[in-house]
Image (spheres, helix red, strand yellow):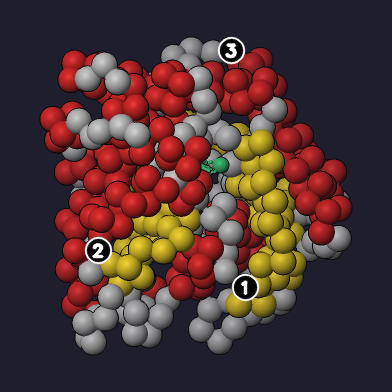
């Protein structure tokens, strides 16, 4: 099948469960890689009862079948409404939609269940609700195909990162800081099979939980609370000894690793060294920064240097809500500068911080529509390229 230019929307809602990001992208076939132009972007917060239901389902040791079925449907309605609001506001006409869904469970490592050992993942949100409301086919459920091809099902943004940011003479790292933080590293002049991508560890997840618990705020806006605190070095050091950070890429993390249970322990540790709540926030922010920088240093820096013949610096491009946390960005810059990286927000490259992941699922939907693989095996650990997801027809 030959590829054709289409206007495609991507719908993303990440592990922060803060809301829905929508990106509308014009995608045209290109010689080496598809060409993308961002036409529109919008963000929608989840209504409070829906957010509560999502967080409850994510963290539940047990829940009911009715609850999950209803949540799946309700999410589909929320995505459909966000999509409708976007096309109305920006007067765009869509050919196709890609919807990531809400991850309720992602287990990257195999464990035994009912007599068989396997890894599994689940993104909820009934895609048919979107197809029916918009009259446009929807691709959803992207991750299983990669997992059945031997991959971890994540990260899936690597192909977009490559299509948009690969550079002949500049090494580039695309660092997304959502609930979880992940990076895609593209050495200067690299082919797509030389791309590295993995979850560095926590993004805003621990910070958000602490901001809620200690300051009754959904997050630490602009990092202003952390800016007033002092980093508790012993807590930082012991937190970095977490087994996750010695896992070699490909590796993926989620609420299973850095969710509520983790944050509760982190808080208990901080309280042993300081009674000031802002010190706890500062330490959690430093923890995210340090886990990102040390992941880069340990697994990526050498490859980037080897490809950067002119000894030029690496562009370290941050997206996701974490790019708006000034304290986190300052801590990151301080740690990455000595490693030869120039830190920048993705906004300096013409892309709104929250739009990138949504745009990635537009690209993946376009590829699936043309029966083309969307995973990057070097990033997910898959044995082969896989056509991702399934289509709900309007
Ligand atoms: N102005 C801001 N200051 C600090 N943090 C912010 C700001 N805006 C967003 N964030 C952080 O970004 C998170 C949402 O980021 P997002 O990229 O949507 O993550 P996810 O993909 O996990 O949903 C919020 O939960 C919050 O922690
Ligand atoms: Mg979000």
Secondary structure at numbered mark 2: helix
User: Between tags 2 and 1, which lies in front?
Assistant: 2
Q: Is residue 346 above or below residue 134?
A: below
231 relative to 33 in the view: left or right? left
What is the crowding at mark 3: few (fewer than 14 residues within 10 Å), some, or many (at least 20)? few
Work out whether residue 180 or residue 209 is closer to the camera in this orientation and state it: 209
Q: Is residue 260 above or below residue 36?
A: above
Residue 211 — which label?
none
Residue 230 can be seen, yes or no? yes
Secondary structure at numbered mark 3: loop
Comes first in the chain, label 3 or label 2: 3
Q: Are marks 2 and 1 in contact (CB under 8 Å)?
A: no
| Image location (x, y in percent) of residue 306 | 19, 77
Residue on which the image places disc 1:
36
Work out whether residue 339 or residue 34 is closer to the camera in this orientation and state it: 339
- The CA span between labels 3 and 1 is 42 Å
Residue on which the image places disc 3:
64
> Does mark 2's beta carbon lie closer than 8 Å to ligand 1?
no
Residue 130 can be seen, yes or no? no
372 relative to 222 in the view: left or right? right
What is the crowding at mark 1: few (fewer than 14 residues within 10 Å), some, or many (at least 20)? many
- In the rendered image, which quarter contains the N terminus? bottom right
Q: Residue at x 59, y 83 (%)?
A: 30
Residue 337 — which label?
2
- Disc tally is 3
Work out whether residue 123 or residue 264 is closer to the camera in this orientation and state it: 264
277 relative to 2 in the view: left or right? left
Q: Residue at x 81, y 59 (%)?
A: 90
| Residue 115: quadrant of the picture | top left
């Amino acid at each position: 099948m030959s590829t054709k230019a289409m206007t495609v929307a991507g719908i993303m809602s990440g592990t922060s469960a803060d809301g829905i990001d929508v990106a509308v992208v014009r995608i045209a076939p290109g010689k080496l890689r598809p060409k993308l132009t961002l036409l529109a972007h919008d963000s929608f917060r989840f209504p409070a009862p829906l957010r509560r239901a999502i967080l409850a389902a994510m963290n539940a040791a047990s829940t009911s079948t009715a609850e999950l079925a209803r949540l799946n449907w309700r999410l589909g309605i929320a995505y459909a409404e966000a999509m409708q609001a976007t096309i109305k506001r920006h007067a765009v006409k869509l050919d196709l939609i890609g919807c990531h869904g809400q991850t309720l469970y992602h287990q990257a490592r195999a464990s035994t269940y009912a007599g068989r050992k396997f890894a599994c993942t689940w993104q909820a949100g009934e895609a048919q609700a979107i197809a029916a409301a918009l009259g446009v086919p929807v691709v959803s459920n992207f991750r299983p195909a990669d997992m059945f091809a031997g991959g971890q099902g994540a990260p899936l943004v690597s192909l977009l990162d490559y299509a948009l940011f690969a550079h002949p003479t500049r090494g580039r790292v695309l660092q997304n800081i959502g609930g979880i933080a992940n990076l895609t590293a593209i050495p200067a002049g690299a082919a797509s099979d030389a791309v590295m991508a993995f979850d560095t560890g926590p993004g805003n997840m621990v910070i958000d939980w602490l901001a809620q618990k200690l300051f009754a705020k959904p997050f630490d806006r602009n990092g202003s609370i952390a800016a007033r605190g002092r980093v508790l070095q012993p807590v930082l050091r012991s937190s970095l000894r977490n087994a996750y950070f010695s896992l070699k890429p490909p590796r993926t993390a989620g609420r299973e690793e850095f969710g509520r249970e983790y944050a509760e322990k982190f808080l208990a540790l901080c309280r042993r060294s300081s009674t000031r709540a802002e010190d706890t926030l500062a330490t959690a922010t430093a923890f995210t920064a340090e886990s990102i920088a040390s992941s880069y240093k340990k697994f990526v820096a050498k490859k980037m240097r080897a490809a950067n013949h002119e000894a030029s610096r690496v562009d370290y491009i941050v997206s996701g809500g974490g790019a708006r946390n000034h304290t986190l960005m300052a801590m990151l810059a301080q740690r990455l500068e000595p490693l030869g990286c120039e830190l920048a927000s993705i906004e300096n490259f013409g892309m709104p911080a929250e739009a990138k992941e949504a745009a990635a699922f537009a690209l993946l939907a376009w590829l699936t529509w043309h029966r083309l693989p969307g995973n990057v095996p070097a990033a997910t650990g898959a044995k082969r390229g896989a056509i991702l997801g399934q289509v709900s027809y309007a």
